[in-house]
Image: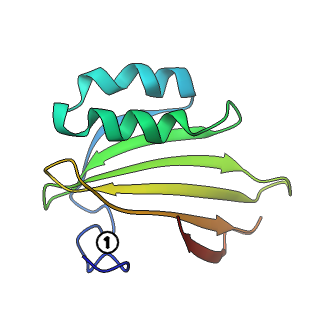
Amino acid sequence: MSKSGSGFFKGTRGARTLYSGKTKSGALSSVTSMPLSIQKSVKSFFKGSSNNYNHYSVQKTEKGGYLVKMENPGRVPGSKAIYYKEINSEGKTVRVYKETYDPSGKLIHTKEK
C-alpha cells in the first residue's frame, strides 16, 4: 500500500460508523465493542491523545478496512489538527498521518507519522 492510500481509504462515502464521541475516556471505553482484530491498534491510537482532543471516531469502510480519527483543537482559535490511522481488515496499520487546518477550514498540510 502506498503512502497515498491508493484509494483504499479515500473518502468515507459508504462507511459505517462504529464509534463517534467527544471524550478520550468514552473513546477508550468503546474499544471493547469493536472487532477483536482492531482493538489493540485503536486503543493505542486513542491513548496517544491528551484530554484536549475531541471528536473521536472509528469507521468501517466499504472495502472492509477501518478509519480511526481524533481531532486536536489548535492554539489559534478555529484551527485544528486531525489525526488518522488506517487499519486493514486483518488489523494491520496501513497508514498514520495528520492533517492541519487553518481557522477558515482550509487544509494547510498533511504529515505522515
User: Would you place residue 100 above or below residue 20 in this image?
Assistant: below
Q: Quadrant of residue 64?
A: bottom left
In this rendering, position of residue 113 left or right of residue 67: right
| Closer to the camera in the image, 13 or 26 | 26
- Picture coordinates of residue 34 (x, y %)? 24, 30
| Closer to the camera in the image, 73 or 35 | 35
Dot 1 amino acid type: Lys
In this rendering, position of residue 26 left or right of residue 17: right
- Picture coordinates of residue 101 (x, y %)? 67, 67
Q: Residue at x 31, y 61 (%)?
A: 12
User: Would you place residue 60 above or below residue 47 in this image?
Assistant: below
Indicate the quadrant containing the N terminus: top left, top right, bottom left or bottom right: bottom left
- Picture coordinates of residue 97 (x, y %)? 50, 64
Q: Residue at x 32, y 34 (%)?
A: 40
Report the number of discs.
1
User: Would you place residue 101 above or below residue 16 in this image?
Assistant: below
In this rendering, position of residue 111 left or right of residue 30: right
Q: Secondary structure at mark 1?
A: loop
| Closer to the camera in the image, 53 or 78 | 53
Q: Which residue is mark 1?
A: 10
Q: Residue at x 55, y 28 (%)?
A: 24
Q: Quadrant of residue 9?
A: bottom left
Furthest-right residue in this view:
76
Decide: few, some or many residues near mark 1? Use Cα within 10 Å; few <14, some 14-19, many ≥20: few
- Picture coordinates of residue 71 (x, y %)? 59, 48
